[in-house]
Amino acid sequence: MAGEPVNVNEFEELARQALPNMYYDFFAGGAEDQYTLEENIEAFRRIIIRPRILVDVSRIDMSTVILGHKTSAPIMIAPTMMHKFAHPEGEIATARGAASRDVIAVIFSEKKNRFYRILALKREITEHMVRQAESNGFRAIILTTDTPALGRRKADITNKMIAPQLRNFEGLLSTKFVSEKACAAETLDRSFCWKEIAWLKSVTKLPILIKGILTSEDAMKAIEAGVAGIIVSNHGARQLDYTPATISVLEEVVHVVQGKVPVLIEGGIRRGTDIFKALALGAKAVLIGRPVIYGLAAKGESGVKQVIEMLKNELEQTMALAGCCTVADITRNYVKTEKERFLGRM
């Protein structure tokens, strides 16, 4: 690709050129037929924006507050694994890029605005990770709940993907595995269920957000369990294929939650218009995964900065053209879904 990328989609090709095929496939691939992987993106395209004209948009303020933490825009860095596959500086470069643009990163770093992601692992491993988060000054815990087992990803199987050596788990489990499957067998806890949320709350004072919600039923259970926030997610389409696109179920979850806790969303977000649509449908903020990894692979920390800045600039432009001066102005009336358009034609 000639010249500098002009949107975040163009970083994917740069990443493909920069990475070994095995690592690019690891980041880019989805589960099985990759239906949900494609649908995560396509579903955003089926939502249209209803702009307002003759609005004074001389000042646009994208800042928001998430769990008491002010951030420059409703954009967060999603928890993704193996950043060192993308760049030698790994998560540290990603965290620095996020901090420089004043957005929250769900990642380990030495900067402000840090949320810590844990999986539904065996109790002793989970508690160890929670203690690490607390001792390192993290602000919240993100519990990923859609991994009782690993999704089946054809590219990783074909490439014979090898799990990297784990760090900071000495004495708890083997830190070197020959495959992702072997790693999952020793770490993931298939018996982890809703009652474990109460246990997790008992071992930490940090707020807990639950990631992996796709239905109103689970959203209600999350509220009843006393979580501090919900992340609508299908794990970047890497776990169970043929689950719905996250944007298609966001409003269902928001309706059940009724403002009791913030609802965030990840999956398929590639444009500032996508962020605008998610906010209009009730999300407090969005989490960006693959585009950040692609930026990291292409240009390291500066690539992460560029990706975040591109999305912020696009969101600011979308807000101005739609007639919204603040994120609070982006309400449900600013978008129309495919279902609404269909019903309107009947």
Image: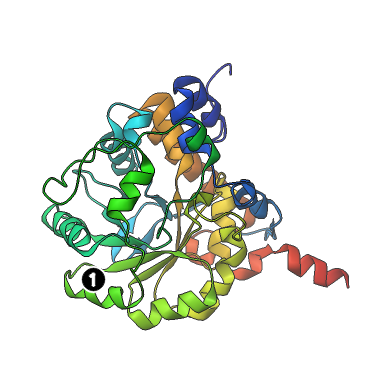
Residue at x-position 71% and y-position 55%: 46
Residue 323 percent location from the top left of the image: 61, 58
Q: How many marks?
A: 1
Assign the C terminus to one quadrant of the image: bottom right
Residue at x-position 44% and y-position 32%: 160
Residue at x-position 36% and y-position 72%: 193
Which three-letter amino acid code belongs to the residue tagged 1?
Leu
108 or 306, nearer to the observer: 108
Residue 198 percent location from the top left of the image: 26, 78
Assign the N terminus to one quadrant of the image: top right
190 or 291, nearer to the observer: 190
* Residue 57 is at least partly visible in this image: no
Quarter of the image for residue 69 reads bottom left
Is residue 197 shown above or below 55? below
Answer with left or right where residue 43 lies relative to residue 294: right
Answer with left or right where residue 10 lies relative to residue 161: right
Q: Secondary structure at mark 1?
A: helix
Q: Residues within 10 Å of mark 1 (few under 14, many from 20)?
A: some
333 or 180, nearer to the observer: 180
Residue at mark 1: 200
Is residue 52 shown above or below 85? below
* Residue 37 is at least partly visible in this image: yes
